[in-house]
Amino acid sequence: MQAWFARTDHPDAGDPYFLYAASNVGSFLALLSYPTVVEPLISLSAQTRLWTIGFWVLIALIMGSGVLMWRTRAGAPRPAAAEPTAQAPAPAAPSWRDGLTWCGLGAVPAGLLIAVTAHISTDVAAVPLLWVVPLALYLLTFVIVFQRRPLIPHWLAVGLQPLFILALVGVLILDPVRILALLGFGNLDPVKIIITIIALHCAVFFVNALVCHGELARRRPAARHLTVFYLWLAAGGTIGGIATGLIAPLTFSWVAEYPILIVLAALCRPGLALPQNRQGRQLMLGGLAVTVLLMTAFKQFHPDFEETRFDWVIGSFLTMSVLFWRAPVPFAATLAVALFINQTYVDVNGSISVRSFFGVHKVADSEDGRFRVLSHGTTLHGAERIRDQDGKPVSGRPDILMYYYDGSAMAQVMDAVRVRNAGPIRYAVVGLGAGSLACRAKPADTVHYYEIDPAIIHIARDSGLFHFLSACRPEVPIMLGDARLTLADAPDGTYDIIYVDAFSSDAIPIHLITREAMAIYLRKLAPHGIAVIHVSNRFLELASVVTGIAAANGAVTRVNDGSDFVEKESEYLFVGTVVAVARNDLDFGALAFSNYWPRQTPDPDQWVWTDDYSNVVGAVIRQLRASNKEEEQ
């Protein structure tokens, strides 16, 4: 469309790139409106119809524009042969070097978008809809740089980029909480610290994308070559997305693409060039050789380093990079060295990382060495006691911790079903974690696990990491795949209990808490079975969602919010919100007579979640209201 516009006699046809800024304004508004307006108010089937109509209208408008262009050009008067007009020389066609430059400048911010989103939404804080912020900033940079008069001049973004990058690298390497404590700010609100760190990541991403896209805008060709320009730009975005989203998870055991892309963003600064004279090239090669020697020596001796000395080593490299902030190559090289040394330190003294399509899972020992913890970002998925109070190794059947210990809501449901059955029970668990619930089974019980992530299965079965499965149920069946599909293949009426514990902060498998999903659970339950949904969440209120989908299937719901327990975080004993669903009140057994398991009634003003409708924003708002009410009380 821009190419067509450039061929018209419009006064702005000579530089149609401002239309790219306009189109990204539309993308920006659409991004913000979908989770806040479209998803809460329009079902998926209605959205499909509206999108279909919209696409047909788009096709008709493009065809209409094409017809107008054809008629305009066909009817345009031709200059007389006797009166030639002077014409400016046609601009040279873009070279392969130009195309590769455009491709690289498009690939780095596209890859950085995916990397920074993965980092802040898992390693920093798993906040619902947090992914919207980096994507909105990404679109906003296009809007800014392709304007006739950019709101943020390119020279300003280029000048600020080194300062922002150094601040971010410092946060990535040096624990900001510990540094603040050393400076006398140890009493800061942890939530404010997390918000500040997220803001820094987003700000640095914004500046880096602004520099890369600003270079694209500065290097854009004449209007007659804009099609090939956008083709190279799109190719770069594709390469960046594939490399970061598909190749990196298969290559690295941690989110290595994030620091790599930060270094590449530093190389996207104007002025990228190798030294032209012999002395400069020798100096650069000598510096690289010294760097390699320092990195080798550090890797050999750094396990004996104290953490403070490590900070001084990293700080020296960051200080050195300040001297080269005007030269992209030395600046990027010093950043790369600092990040490499940091990761080497973490690899030896830190956790074990296992990466899959679903993220990076880390296994690490607690600071006191008494517990081994499985985490995904900031969310814990399992914990095992490996040493007692005296520091001696623990042997035998492992203690059950997290949300599954004796007396917990999860355990109460199982105890009530055992009493009612007066014999062995059969139960299924959706979400493996470290396999803790396997140790609640008695010899005659039947246990089945349903897990979608093969990396989690590998961790849980590794007796060198956790012992729940090896000590309690070595041969327990684990059905790999989406639990909604694999559970549907199980015979009807199979299980006395179905535990659904596959929720982790903002990573909500919505298809497991819909009306149709609840219908599957009830169909797979025995005549008096109970479905148990673990809905503990820092940002989303989901208990009312489960109540609604249960009522839509004619079932009864009771909720335990953990008020009858005292959380012992240092012992990895947590309270949570657990929803129990049964066909009638009699099926709850002893739970029906407990004050800590009140019966729930569905909210008539709240739409039932289905495979065709969900409202994450509504769940966030309800949780915020509940939190504010607790603070007022």
Image (cartoon, rainbow, N blue to C red):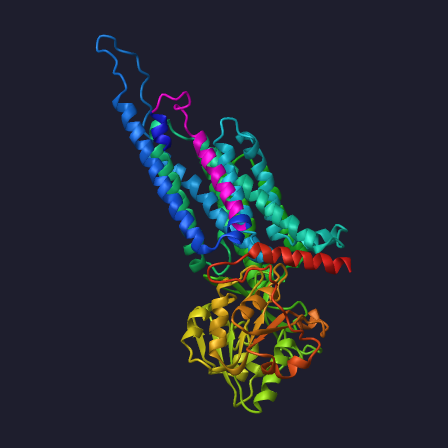
Q: Residue at x 49, y 62 (%)?
A: 610
Residue 287: percent from left, percent from top:
51, 43
Magenta stretch holds residue 280: no
Residue 238: percent from left, percent from top:
39, 47
Instruction: Say if 27 sits above or below 66 in the image.
Output: below
Q: Quarter-wise, where is residue 574 in the image? A: bottom right
Q: Residue furthest left?
A: 81
Magenta stretch holds residue 27: yes
Instruction: Say if 517 sits above or below 188 in the image.
Output: below
Closer to the camera in the image, 207 or 494 = 494
Q: Tell me if I can see residue 279 in this picture.
A: no
Q: Tell me if I can see residue 601 in this picture.
A: yes
Magenta span dominant secondary structure: helix
Q: Residue furthest top?
A: 82
Residue 627: percent from left, percent from top:
70, 59
Closer to the camera in the image, 631 or 123 = 631
Residue 586: percent from left, percent from top:
60, 83
Instruction: Say if 328 sits above or below 594 in the image.
Output: above
Quarter placement of the C terminus? bottom right
Describe residue 249's horizontal placement relative to residue 601 as left or right.
left
Quarter placement of the N terminus? top left
Describe residue 229's horizontal placement relative to residue 435 as left or right.
left
Q: Which residues are magenta?
A: 8-35
